Amino acid sequence: REGGDLLFPKVSFGLQVYDDNTAQKLTKTAIDAGFRNFFASVLAGNQKGFARAIAASGVPREELFICGTVLSNSAKGFENAYRLTKQGCNANLRAFAVGGISYVDMIMLDYPANDCDSIRGQWKAFEEMLAEGTARSLAVSNFSPEQLDCILADKSATAPVVNQLPFSVGQYDPAAVRENAKRGILVQAWSPLSGGSLSRRKLSACKEIGRAYGKSAAQVALRWILQMGATYATQTKKREHFAEDLDVFDFELTQEEMQKLGSP
């Protein structure tokens, strides 16, 4: 998806690890495998390790797409939500600065606050990052259509580019992509392989389909997400899976295969 001069990669590596040293090692492995889109979550507290790996990689900053996150869903009221979100934005910038990263390509709200007024307070802090040039785009995670409309009701507001949602073979809301697309928002799947717990029936179907293409069950499941009109963030820790998770662009599932994987 392209917005202005912003190109959002279809595949992201999500650092779901809880220490900086592991984050640094996994980031290097991901870069070596070809990843250039990274999602470093404040929930995991691994942004400094990630930033150090980026600094050591030698990859030009303009070739990378870096996403940070802010958690401020406990806030109550516009001002409190604005203040907590602003603190989270600044915390991201401090952590990434360890690796010489002065801006993020995307900043994401991990969860919405409980009411529209508070969500608008969260969004004000994000729009200030955009205006300052410390973020190039804005995103959300786990937002319902109604919560998205809390933002979009203000016609002058900057719309989120991405809504990160649980979305995988056999475990997804069929309306999710459609409702977000109506609002000009792209769905990014977190836990795109259901945390490694696809149902036995769906796993068997993915394996069977994969044999026809010379692909693994995981690659089939990831390809299904792309053909559903979504993108995904992988979370692997195994070296052999990094390249595999990127190698999904040289085959296409048939309509029958898509329906088989998408059925309940």
Image (spheres, grey):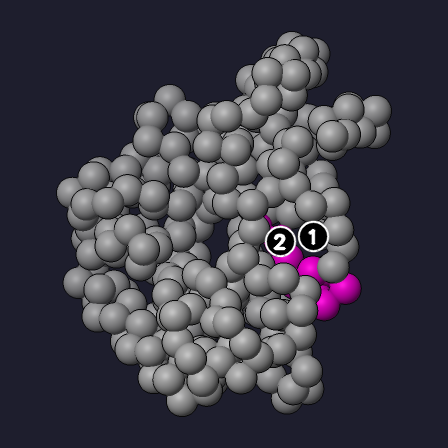
Label disc, if present, on residue 256 of the rendered structure: none
- Report if residue 38 lies within the magenta region: no
Q: Quadrant of residue 82?
A: bottom left
191 and 213: which is toward the camera: 191
Q: Amino acid at mark 2?
A: Val
Mark 2 and 1 residues: CB-CB less than 8 Å, in contact?
Answer: yes
Q: Amino acid at mark 1?
A: Ala
Q: Which residues are magenta?
A: 180-189
Q: Give the left or right position of residue 178, taking residue 57 as reference.
A: right
- Residue at 33 percent across and 26 percent down: it is 239
Is residue 255 in view from this perspective? yes
- Residue at 69 percent across and 60 percent down: it is 180
Task: Write down the residue under mark 1.
Answer: 176
Label disc, if present, on residue 187 of the rendered structure: 2
- Report if residue 185 lies within the magenta region: yes
Position of residue 141 measured from the top left corner of the image (x, y, whole percent): 51, 59
Is residue 102 in view from this perspective? no
The nearer-to-camera label among 2 and 1 is 1
Give the secondary structure at mark 1. Answer: helix
